[in-house]
Image (cartoon, rainbow, N blue to C red):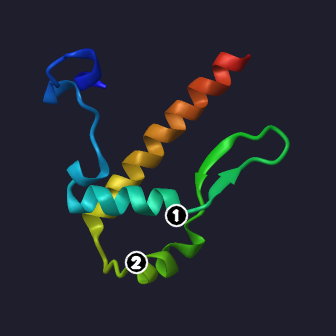
Amino acid sequence: MCEQMGWEPNPDEMPMTFNDLSYEAAIAVTLFQALPDKIEGMNGIWLGKDFAGLGDIMELYGIEGNRDAFELLQFIIAESSKHYEAQRKARK
């Protein structure tokens, strides 16, 4: 798009890509995407992620006990929870 508009790309304004993430962050994002959501029945409120299959998912991806990735996963879940809560309040 920059080329078409005749602009010089600014690396500081470019969005991050998956390849820009650290190994642990990439694992956390992968796990976040693979784990199923927990949704409260009638109201459709997002409750977080279902960790029941976490061990199997980690085994499939060849991830061995990465505590940093798990802590980042918890952070992603907390931020997602804030986002979904803000969306829910905006709809009221």
Instruction: Decide which of tag 1 and tag 2 comes sooner along the chain.
Output: 1
**Type of amino acid under label 2:** Tyr
Instruction: Measuring from the top left, give residue 14's x and y in whole percent.
Output: 24, 30
Instruction: Measuring from the top left, give residue 48's x and y in whole percent.
Output: 58, 50
How many discs mark residues in the rendered view? 2
Residue 84, quarter of picture:
top right
The quadrant of the image that shows the N terminus is top left
What residue is drawn where x is 22% and y is 62%?
A: 23
What residue is drawn where x is 85% and y is 42%?
A: 42
**Left or right relative to 82: residue 20:** left
Mark 2 crowdedness (10 Å alpha carbons): few <14, some 14-19, many ≥20: few
Which type of secondary structure does the marked residue at label 2 adopt? Answer: helix
Mark 1 crowdedness (10 Å alpha carbons): few <14, some 14-19, many ≥20: some
Q: Is residue 28 above or below residue 66?
A: above
Residue 89, quarter of picture:
top right
**Residues at discs 1 and 2 in contact (Cβ within 8 Å):** yes
CA gap between label 1 and label 2 equals 10 Å
- The residue indicated by pointer 2 is 61
**Left or right relative to 73: residue 3:** left
Residue 91 is marked as none
**Left or right relative to 5: residue 33:** right
**Type of amino acid under label 1:** Ala
Q: Is residue 42 above or below residue 50?
A: above
Q: Is residue 42 above or below residue 12?
A: below
Instruction: Measuring from the top left, give residue 35's x and y in whole percent.
Output: 55, 63
- The residue indicated by pointer 1 is 34
* Residue at the extreme right of the image, as rendered: 42
What residue is drawn where x is 27% and y is 40%?
A: 16
Which type of secondary structure does the marked residue at label 1 adopt? Answer: helix
Q: From the viewer's side, name the closer residue of 16 and 47.
A: 16
